[in-house]
Amino acid sequence: MSGLAIPGRAAGGGRTGGAGPRPLDLADIQGNILRPYGRFGFPITRHIFFNIASAAAGRDFIGLILGAVTSAERWGAIDDETVGPFVPRPLVALNIGLSYRGLAALQLPTRTLAGMPEEFIDGMAKRWSILGDIGPSAPSAWDPIWLAGQEETGRQIHILVSLNAQALQDGTPVPELDESMAMLEQAANVSAGVTRLTGHRGPNPDFQDASAIMRRMPDGTVVPTAREHFGFTDGIGDPTFVGQYEPKAEAVEVIGAGKLVPGNSRWTPLATGEFILGHPNEAQELPPTAAPWAFMRNGTFMAYRKLHQNLRRFDAYIDAQADFMQHVGGIASRDEARETLLAKMSGRWPSGIPLEMAPSYAEALALQKTWGDIPAIELKGPARTALETQRLNAYNRLITDFRYNGDIDGARCPVSAHIRRTNPRDALDPLLTTQGAPAGTSLTNRRRILRRGAPYGSSTTRDNEGEHGVIFMALCASLFNQFEFVQQQWVHYGASFNVGNDTDPLVGLRRPGAKFVIAGDTARQSAPFICANMPQFVETRGGEYFFLPSLTALRDIAQGSVDPT
Amino acid sequence: MPNYDAGHYFLTVLAPVRPDPELVDGRWVSRRRALRETLNAMPTGERTVATQGSAPANPFARSIITHFARFFVLDDVVYNGRVSQDSVLSAILKINPLKAQTVDRLSTPFLVFVADFDAAGGGAENLRECLTILWRTMSLELTQVFRHCIGFDNIDEPAQFCAYIQKCQVETTMPFNDYWSLPPGLPTFDLKPYIYSASAAGVFTVAGLFIWRPWLLLLGVLALGVTIFTGYRRVLEAARRPFPPSPPPGPGADLPTVLKALTLQREFTQFAIDTQGKGDQELYDAFGDFVTRTKPNDPGADMQPPGVVGA
């Protein structure tokens, strides 16, 4: 073999050959694992769920739609890929997930099924106690489609098909979305035995729509924004792993999103095995998987959650606390108090600028002014010039390239703030000091999740009862080690951060008397502020764990050739 | 350090489970099963927020001396399989891998009872004091459990219970304390005299060997032996010394103090919330009321009851 030149991709994936980590087989990996589609020009998402009545029908259905599944292949210039051949960017991206019950309905071999992780076998509803799905979030209160799925075999959720569509200038999806829907419908009919499940709360019970919140521009066009219904900029701190991007893009994306190696202040991408099965992970092991390995390889797991947002409750609470905070802290304006409160809860100002970079309202305003051209550049999309791209990268670096070693006590960003809990960076390092070499992030490197999701519903009516929230998706090689750990230990508990019973101020579970503490700052002579009696802002309305198989594995399923012997 | 540490008596008891089954309603029931049934039915108290106000009380909560208590049945030791052997070494030593090795087993299952109590010292009399309190407050439950163990017959006096427990007691070699918020100021072990003494002994030995003076060699070896022996003794002695009962400058860590501290922590948080934004005089007055009401220096007053989880 040594004499043979192996055509392939170097680090990051560029087809230049040579040394570096083994490139990912992008044509075998589903596209939603590598890409947050929203950032690649697909602001509109539609999730459709299916039930399989017979294994043969299920195999036929998957075989019929297999050709439409979007892989992780690069899209030329969009991905900074310089060496062809390029795969064109589709107008609608299609991806498939299979629940454990789906795999069982497809009659996969018992050895394969028994080797699946426990939490995946349980399914999301059964993990309620770990996920904090109690009270209004209890599985018994979920949308009818999820409720029926728990109760009736014929309505169990087996297959998830996610369609991500590009938008027209008026903000509506491209017509190809309807074509994809028709294709799915036809595949279900032809396979005779696969049923589209209904029962989503919202305008259409047949599917779950989600979409970036759109903004109408002066010229009449409608453009997507990165905001969610509470008003925060979402989707900033996603992890970056080896092979996810082309080298040039990786150099930009890895900042604040990878890991810090002890003694080195440079960000490096996380191990691929934290996010894709069949590759070494951060523990320098292959993630444990079911047999056959070839079936699991290049696949991953996903937690799909429909999270409802109580907008009126949130607004009312923030308003009341902002008034009180302005009074207690002697803050000049109501706006400053409100924005500061929101920033302290989230860890970022609503614009996305982190507290670590701008701890005060005045500093945040100053930064926002300095970078006032960024929103316009962001909205330009692929049409932006090289100079604009450079400026956007510099801004992205500003909002992601920070650590907590200068703020151990949380005087700037509270230790219990949302982004500090869910992505603690170096904050949990037991040897964290302000001086010396940058501390590693090894305690958190195995707890990262890729977030893929978008808001659903409208927030024009800011009530509690309406349909508005986030379709949240977490992708990781181990739902137990990553998604469930973050959800239970970091979102719903306070022990890791020495904050007693306090939970995440935005998405945490609330008990009577729940509170959130904003640390005072001796340098600024500001007293601490306690937000008391916090109500439940976010509730679970449904969800399931899915396996996102590789294209090879989908083919194996369709052919009925999954063989663990 | 074993058994007694930082003001707490760490009790470890291994009581052998009776091999004979028990006749219950005309059916023979294995003691192992009967014991587990009894233990499973023993109320654990309000251990989580979810059981607040609804769980039956834990019998250990009838007294105010037990920090933690745990019962479990140790069925057997874990069998790790054959002692592994290097195949080359086996061939040289002519070890036959087909010959069965001895398998270590326990002769009977054991009931393990571990608990830590507030005690004034680590002596037998201190333990007897704790056990007497336990017997006086929960003899019914203790009898229900221990009656499945060998030798627990006709025990109905505290003295008999103490004698039984002491007969089954094994030394606690690894006590667990969790109440220090600051590391206690402990003296470090001074190695210097031993290093000097060992070096000198080494020099004597080597010199005795090279210039061949048997008396010097003997002296060196003897000195080395004495150094190692005394050093070893010192380490053991230091290990046997209990930690101080309270982390200076903090308060003691007996159960009433711990429960009071938990109550105060909660009350003070509420106080901080209630007085946010208040003026100086108002805050001063409110704190006066807080101190009067919560009595921080009186552990017995208004503390969280034992066996109950606070919010």
Image (cartoon, coloured by chain):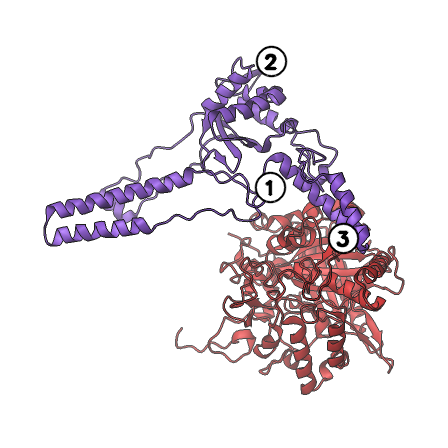
Chain colours: A red, B purple
- Which residue corresponds to the image point at 60% horizontal and 27% vertical from the top-left? B39
- Looking at marks 2 and 1 on the same chain, the residue that comes earlier in the sequence is marked by 2
Chain letter of the residue carrying label 1: B
Residue lying furthest left = B212
Residue B47 placed where, x, y %?
66, 37
Give me the chain letter of mark 2: B
The answer to whether residue A409 of the structure is visible from this angle is yes
Mark 3 element type: strand
User: Relative to the observer, which residue lies in front, B68 or B20?
Assistant: B68
**The N terminus of chain B is located in which quarter?**
top left
Residue tagged 2: B26
- Mark 3 Cα shell of 10 Å, populated few (<14), some (14-19), many (≥20): many
Residues at marks 2 and 3, CA–CA distance in whole angstroms: 52 Å
Q: Which residue is mark 3?
A: A542
The residue shown at (38%, 32%) is B104
Mark 2 surroundings within 10 Å by alpha-carbon count, few (fewer than 14), some (14 through 19), many (20 or more): few
Is residue A528 rendered to the left or right of residue A443? right
Cβ–Cβ under 8 Å for marks 2 and 3: no
Farthest-out residue, right: A461
Q: Which mark is on residue B251?
A: 1
Q: Amino acid at mark 1?
A: Pro
Q: Name the chain under label 3.
A: A
Secondary structure state at the residue bearing disc 1 = loop
Q: Position of residue A247 (x, y in %)?
A: 56, 77
Camera-nearest label, 2 or 1: 1
**In the picture, residue A388 is in which quadrant?**
bottom right
Secondary structure under tag 2 reads loop
- Name the kind of residue labelled 2 in the image: Gly
